[in-house]
Amino acid sequence: MKRALYVLLFLLFSKNLSAADLTAETYWEGLKSSVTLLYQGSYMQFRAENNLYYAGAAVPALWYSFEEDKRITHNQMKKRIPKYMQVASDLAPVLSFPIIPIAAFSLGVKYDNPKSVQFAKETFATMYLALVESAALSVIDIHERPKKDKLSKWETNFRGKSSFPSGHVVPYAALTLKTLQFYGPYWAAVPGALFVATSFQRIRDGKHYLSDVVGGFFLTAFAAEGVRKAGKYQDTDTAYKSIFDTYRIGYTAYEGVLGPMISFDW
């Protein structure tokens, strides 16, 4: 099943690439631009205002997850894993390769679509920034996996012994967030559903705790906003703008006195 799925994906996207009729130099310039976004996003994520909102949600979510990890995870491990969850989880390592970014970049260049090109670059940068950070954080001794047997090379060769945060969910999280940013919630619902299905599979299979997938999502969200700030792309979806660009929280000073500030842009 897995092998047939991999072959199908390869044929699908290799067809798109050959149809694009692009030169090696075009791909090389696109790769350099994407890596630049990754590098700039790595430090700009700490300056992105929207990450304050994510942090406000991440702190209580992670606190609750760590507190209830064993109870929730062990309860989930007693449940069966439906086929669709297994397929979604098996597809995640495939999407950790830049299949979708390359296809989107190729089609964007071929049809002169700057949004598709920028989507490809930011998705690439977000995914690999989050994967690198996930691997680095896994070296910290937080907790090992609920079940340590039957681990694949993907789960042992590219990260430390700690299962926090989950790198397995990062490709779906990056695709969901960037699709939401560029194309809106309806398109983002597809990778979002795959993210949820994969998260449940990882917990039920004993490969991760609840806190691991929660941490993987927010790690990717921080990276996504850092890359967005570095990309300076303004043509984002209306729904995304209404969530992230309508309100501003900060501080102001009046006659030497600091105070909180909330602004609205309607």
Image (cartoon, rainbow, N blue to C red):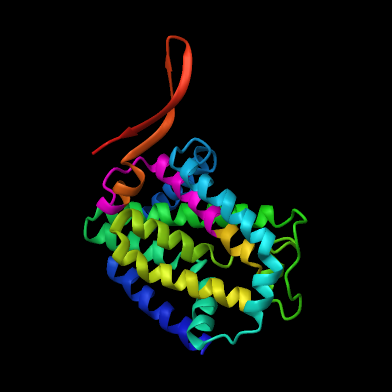
Residue in the picture at 41% in, 83% down: 8
List x then y, in percent, for residue 80. 59, 87
Return the residue nearer the eye: 89 or 78. Answer: 78
Residue 176 vertical placement versus 203 (above, below): above
Return the residue nearer the eye: 138 or 247. Answer: 247
Q: Is residue 238 magenta?
A: yes
Left or right of 119? Residue 68 is right
Residue in the picture at 33% in, 42% down: 245
Q: Is residue 200 magenta?
A: no
Residue in the picture at 42% in, 56% down: 123
Return the residue nearer the eye: 195 or 131. Answer: 195
Left or right of 246? Residue 143 is right
List x then y, in percent, for residue 229. 41, 40
The magenta segment is 217-239
Left or right of 23? Residue 91 is right
Q: Quadrant of the C terminus?
A: top left
List x then y, in percent, for residue 21. 29, 65
Return the residue nearer the eye: 251 or 115. Answer: 251
Q: Residue furthest top?
A: 255
Q: How many marks?
A: 0
Residue in the picture at 24% in, 55% down: 113
Q: Is residue 23 visible?
A: no
List x then y, in percent, for residue 56. 52, 45
